[in-house]
Image (cartoon, helix red, strand yellow):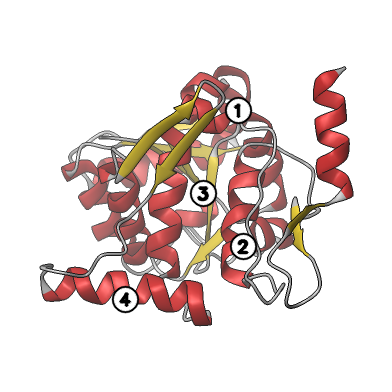
Amino acid sequence: MSKIIVLTRLTVFDEDFIMYAEINEFLSQLNNEGHTIVMLSHSYHSLERMKSIFKEKFNFEITCLFRNDFKTTVDKDDAKNIIFIGSSDEDLYLTAPKKVLIINPGWSVKKGGLPAKYSITLESPLQLLEAIKIIANQNKWYFELDIDENTKLLALTSANTYNKDTTEVEILEGFQRLLKSGDRKYFNTLYFHLISGVMKNDLLREVGLWGNFPSSTGKMNEEIEELKERCRYLTGLKMKEPLFIRHTTGSSTLDWTTPMREAIVKSKK
């Protein structure tokens, strides 16, 4: 499914309007795959300069807009189809209220603290291209079950490696190592599959509380916690405290923490 890829000026050019390495190929591939490309800037001069460069280099359209055009025209219904690439704190302030997925371009000369903290950082345009492919191609959950009128179960992947080809087994085993021992080789792949599912699902985009189950040792898996936090931030939720904690080691009973109790109480008022 095609997406609207929104890029800021310093994601594509340096301060002297020289394109970064791989950007030419990146933009051409986005066009070949049917995505809409939008460039943003505050400056009229920058917009005109970019239009001139794009006209000279490419035979396809790249839309150039003021940042305020994005701010005033994009709403939450549009957000599920947009991927925003930006590295300034202002970019995060622009996307967060609209629940737009933002990816931090690690190659940019602009280094904002907030995108690095609250979004995934990718180190090259071609790595970003692969991420966009994952997001665009993820169109269903591996398993869905309506347990009752208030409970729905979603499974992102199968853990079964039986009768699978070598590549699929490697990825599934990589996911298992991520969950069990924190091996991050396939973290971005799992993240973009998950976040794509959240982006496209109206129900998940309105989730009020995000949590994860601690292991039997009581310790929180840092990678799962990070995935949860990315989902929480995308959906605009502020509560950071864990929903669940384990009792002391040796007990298998799950306990509700104070934040969860408070949420339940509020929901009943």
x and y, in percent, of residue 167 in the image: 17, 73
Q: Which structural element holds mark 2?
A: helix
Q: Nearer the viewer, residue 201 or 161?
A: 161
Which quadrant of the view contains residue 5? top left
x and y, in percent, of residue 206 in the image: 60, 28
Residue named by callout 1: 206
Q: Residues within 10 Å of mark 2 (few under 14, many from 20)?
A: few
Residue named by callout 4: 173
The alpha-carbon separation of the residues under discs 2 and 1 comes to 19 Å
x and y, in percent, of residue 133 in the image: 27, 51
Asked if marks 2 and 1 touch (Cβ < 8 Å), the reply is no
Asked if marks 3 and 1 touch (Cβ < 8 Å), the reply is no
Q: Eyeballing the image, is 186 above or below 102? A: below
Q: Residue at x 54, y 60 (%)?
A: 120
Q: Residue at x 53, y 31 (%)?
A: 151
Instruction: Pick whichever of labels 3 and 1 is earlier in the sequence.
Output: 3
Q: Residues within 10 Å of mark 1 (few under 14, many from 20)?
A: few
- Given the image, on which type of amino acid does mark 4 rest? Glu
Circle 4 or circle 3, nearest the eye: 4
Quadrant position of the N terminus in the picture: top left
The alpha-carbon separation of the residues under discs 4 and 3 comes to 39 Å
The alpha-carbon separation of the residues under discs 3 and 1 comes to 31 Å
Q: Which of the numbered marks, if any, corresponds to residue 226?
A: 2
Residue named by callout 3: 9
Q: Eyeballing the image, is 178 above or below 129? A: below
